[in-house]
Image (spheres, rainbow, N blue to C red):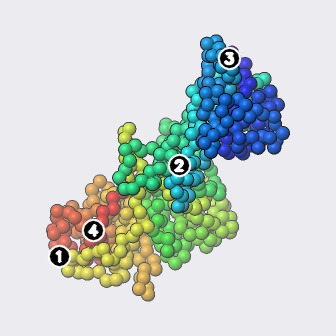
Amino acid sequence: MADESKKISTALISVYNKQGLAEFAANLKELGVKIIATGGTRSVIEGAGVIFQRLEDVARFPEMLDGRVKTLQPEIFAGILARRVEDHLNQLSKFDIEPIDMVVCNFYPFEEVVSKRGVAFEDVIENIDIGGPSLVRAAAKNHESVAVITSPRLYDSTVEELSENQGYLSAETRRSLAEVAFGMVAAYDIAIYNGLLKFREGSEFPEKFFASSTKFEDTKYGENPDQKAAVYKIDGYAGMLDWRQLFGDSRSFNNHLDIGHAFEILEGFDEVAAVATVKHGNISGFAFAPTLGEAYRLAHACDPEADYGCTTVLNRRVDAAAAKFIGKNPGVDEGSIYTELVVAPGYDDAALEILRAKQKKKMRIIEAKKHSNYPFDLRFLEGALLVQTPVDYGKKLGSESLTFPTKAKPDDATVAKLLAAWEVVRKVESNGIVIGDGRYEDDHLTHFWTLGVGSFRKRNGATKIALDNAGERARGAIAASDGFFPFPDSVELLADAGVTAVIQPGGSIRDKLIIETADKLGLPLVLSHARAFKH
């Protein structure tokens, strides 16, 4: 036991979350620690048969102002903040104040309250904890002499160390506990700030921007083996880290990247069974069809070679029929290849059994439930934080927004295919081009699939990549571009390949030339009047 270890003789307990409290208090008492308890905490301790001292017996004043003032008293804070040196101890003695060696505290559930639909502003304000964070900050500041316990998950390790060291806690432990405590207070203050912003009128971004997060896991390494990495969950919001992994190896940093990039591709296609295959954050194939299995086969057929080691994301519960097509399946010749990740909202038992048997049992199977409800899109670059509202992929482009400037006009079936391609190209890294086709029956598009997907520094380069991917399949297909065509060369490339119609935003200073070129080629050109860059 090092000299800097401190004996824990007196503990102040004031907690909202009572989980594990009775056992923890009983253990402290058994170790000879005197307990001071606030009103809300006392019933739990008393029920466990633990003898304690009431806060009112320590402080000069009782709780007041409907509980707003409980611990905010000099006798409490002097006992916590006093350093264990002669001058400070003499001052405590002069005013008959006892040192407090441990503070056990957690806060009102502000985030839980502020996230409730229709919650009143007054209720939010009333659930801002004042005394708790003040106690925790004081104890953490004086961690040289005081231990601060801010979570039930810390109870067992604290009791274990106290038991092993005759009631002492090491300086290293107290410092570690203080770091956790300051992080908790910071996150709580950020939650309050962000919570109050929800009641603010206007859409402008605030003067200060904060986000707090909690570590989800360390990964083996980062994007490359020479990089260290960890994954954090943004506090108070749902997202992909809430999804369950049902089977497979632990996820790598790149796996998390792939999952996040892949799942948003299916946003806006809730009404159909849709599948996307993704490699390194880029779409290698997309399709929708009446059945999930058919959608998978169409998506995978876009670029089978690119799908090696890909992420497959599906927006319907996976049944056995669909599972047979995903990845290698011994004994079934479906031309599929290794799939590293499968992400879907659910799996039938028979489907799970099929998937688990594949790829030497290394396929990672993720059960995805909800899209993220975090209201911002964040980018960290060179010490700068870029913040924007996320794209609403549920808000789809309608035919009423289109204009048709060329002499040749697309029919209803072609317009439906163009609109589907537009929703896919919105998710392709810019500059983005999608070549696709579909099946139109009974006045609606029943199937859609990509034949080529390309992105590049130049739009004609992206066009060439997409056409190279599509090959002869481009003849009779349609195309979508996420930005305007700055020159007529891309239109000429698409027409030469046999593409029958193109959708693009328009807005170039050369729009007139682009339209004239399309007219010469007899190519229907449709303007979306909406840009869809994705960097």
Count residues near mark 1 (Cα–Cα under 10 Å), then give few for <14, some for 14-19, many for 20+.
few
Give the labeled residue for mark 4: 529
- Residue at screen point 29% across, 70% down: 528
In the structure shown, which secondary structural element does the residue marked by tag 4 occupy?
loop
Label 2–label 4 contact, CB within 8 A: no
User: Is any atom of residue 221 visible in this view?
Assistant: no
**Residue for point 54% across, 61% down:** 117
Is label 2 or label 4 in front?
2
**Residue situated in front as seen by the camera: 128 or 521:** 128
- Where disc 2 sits, the SS reads helix
- The residue under label 3 is 93
Q: Amino acid at mark 4?
A: His
Residue pointed to by mark 1:
520
Neighbourhood count class around disc 2 (C-alpha, 10 Å): few under 14, some 14–19, many 20 upward: some
Between the C-alphas of marks 3 and 1, the distance is 97 Å
Using the image as rendered, state which of residue 257 and residue 301 is in the foreground: 257
Q: Hey, what amino acid is under mark 1?
A: Lys
| Disc number lying in front (3 or 1) | 3
Res. 125 mark:
2
Q: Under tag 3, what secondary structure?
A: helix
Q: CA distance from mark 3 to mark 2?
A: 38 Å
